[in-house]
Image (cartoon, grey):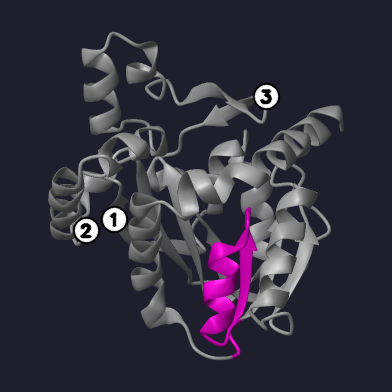
Amino acid sequence: MADIRLRADAFDAFAANYDGNFARTGPGRLLRESVWRRLAPHLHPGLRVLDLGCGTGEDALWLAAQGCDVTASDASLAMLEMTWRKAMAEGLGDRIETRLFDLNAPHDLEGPFDLVLSDFGALNCVVDLAPLADRLRRIVAPGGRIAAVVMGRFCALETLWYGIHGKRTAWRRWTGKSSADIGGKRIPIRYWQPGDLARALGPDFRIEMSRPVGLFLPPSDLFALIERHPRLFAALARWEAQASSSTWPAYLADHHFTLLRSVGS
């Protein structure tokens, strides 16, 4: 139990700066909108959506604005409070319910949900996919989907940039296990390939697509650098868009977008 509370405290401390460091940056917004474009064809008013690791609620707000009924879940009370304040300010409080939920203790969450979204690395905080996969099998409706945006085991830009500068960050993902300083606390991180979640879920789910998110646009710790160079940013954004329809770059990008569909009865 102490480990779960420690992780929540870490993201509580991280909440106040998250939007400024990621969600409201040019690269962060562009990458998030690329996820939304992939989700949009599968949405309709009244869709029941679970946002796993909702953070400050950017995805939950967008989903609610599309007419979806959203359960925004997170282990961090500070993140949930920020999500709720945004929902009320945008007049979307009737479509968003916030729920305290730890991905590493996946109990006491009932469905059914037509779509489960976990965006921008929340699943990288899961140290064992099996318990979460078991819960997802129970709560995803027949024919429902899981959309996971996850950091993979190899990021070409990260390896190149930090390798040139002689930093260990260049190869931190390669073993699939690392740790990160979040909110002044050290937490374990796992790097999952597109097929890892599918294997954990088993034969009741199949992958519909895997796409790169952040192939040419770098990880968030380099956002400030490229925003100082607008022409470079524009070029990287064009290349990002051109690569977005292919599967193989998902294994080289900062994150991969993997869409799975329930085929069970």
Q: Mark 1 points at which residue?
A: 211
Q: Position of residue 118 (x, y in %)?
A: 54, 56
Front one among 192 and 265: 192
User: Mark 3 highlights which residue?
Assistant: 184
Label 3 Cα crowd, 10 Å radius (few <14 / some 14-19 / many 20+): few
Q: Would you place residue 244 above or below residue 200 in this image? A: below
> Are circles 1 and 2 on residues that touch, CB within 8 Å?
yes
Query: Which span of residues is magenta-colored?
Result: 46-68
Query: Which disc, if any, is residue 85?
Result: none
Q: For residue 67: magenta?
A: yes
Q: Which mark's residue is nearer the viewer, 3 or 2?
A: 3
Q: Is residue 261 visible?
A: yes
Residue position for label 2: 244
Describe the element under mark 1 as helix, strand or loop.
strand
Q: What residue type is labelled 3?
A: Gly
Q: Left or right? Give the position of 4 relative to 136.
A: right
The x and y percentages for residue 70 are 65, 75
x 69%, y 82%: residue: 95
